[in-house]
Image (cartoon, rainbow, N blue to C red):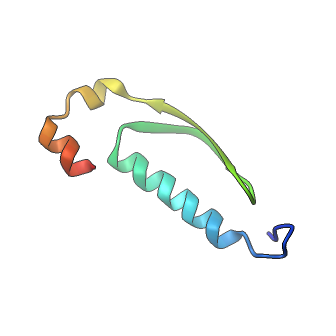
C-alpha cells in the first residue's frame, strides 16, 4: 500500500502489528480487534485486570 506521499506503508504496518502482539504477550491486554491504516491505527483492548492483580511487584518490573 502506498501513502499519499508515495511511500510504501507495509513495513510500518507490519512493525505496528508485531509490536501490538508482542506487548500483548508481555502485559495483560487481550486484543479484541485492530485496524492499521497508512497514517494511524485503531485498537480495541480488554485489560485483564484479574491476571495483572496476581503478578508480584518483581514480575511487573521484569515485564516492564
Q: In the image, 21: left or right of 38?
A: left
Q: Farthest residue in the top direction? A: 50
Query: Which residue corresponds to the image point at 48% horizontal and 58% vertical from the top-left?
Result: 19
Residue placed furthest toward the front: 5
For the image, the number of numbered tags is 0
Q: Quadrant of residue 44?
A: top right
Picture quarter with the N terminus: bottom right
Residue found at x 82% / y 71%: 2
Residue 2 vs 36, above or below: the answer is: below
**Residue 35 against residue 39 in the figure, above or below:** above
Which quarter of the figure has residue 48? top left
Side of 50 where 18 appears, left or right: right
55 on left or right of 1: left
Question: Where 29 falls versus 13 (above or below)?
Answer: above
The percent coordinates of residue 13 (x first, y second) are 64, 63
Where residue 11 appears, as percent x and y from the top left, is: 63, 72
Where is residue 55 shown, x and y percent of the image? 19, 34
- The residue closer to the viewer here, 33 or 58, is 58
| Residue plotted at (37% across, 49% down) | 25
Amino acid at each position: 500500500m502506498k501513502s499519499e506521499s508515495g511511500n510504501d506503508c507495509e513495513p510500518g504496518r507490519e512493525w505496528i502489528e508485531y509490536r501490538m502482539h508482542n506487548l500483548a504477550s508481555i502485559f495483560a491486554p487481550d486484543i479484541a480487534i485492530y485496524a492499521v491504516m497508512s497514517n494511524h491505527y485503531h485498537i480495541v483492548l480488554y485489560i485483564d485486570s484479574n491476571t495483572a492483580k496476581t503478578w508480584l511487584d518483581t514480575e511487573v518490573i521484569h515485564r516492564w
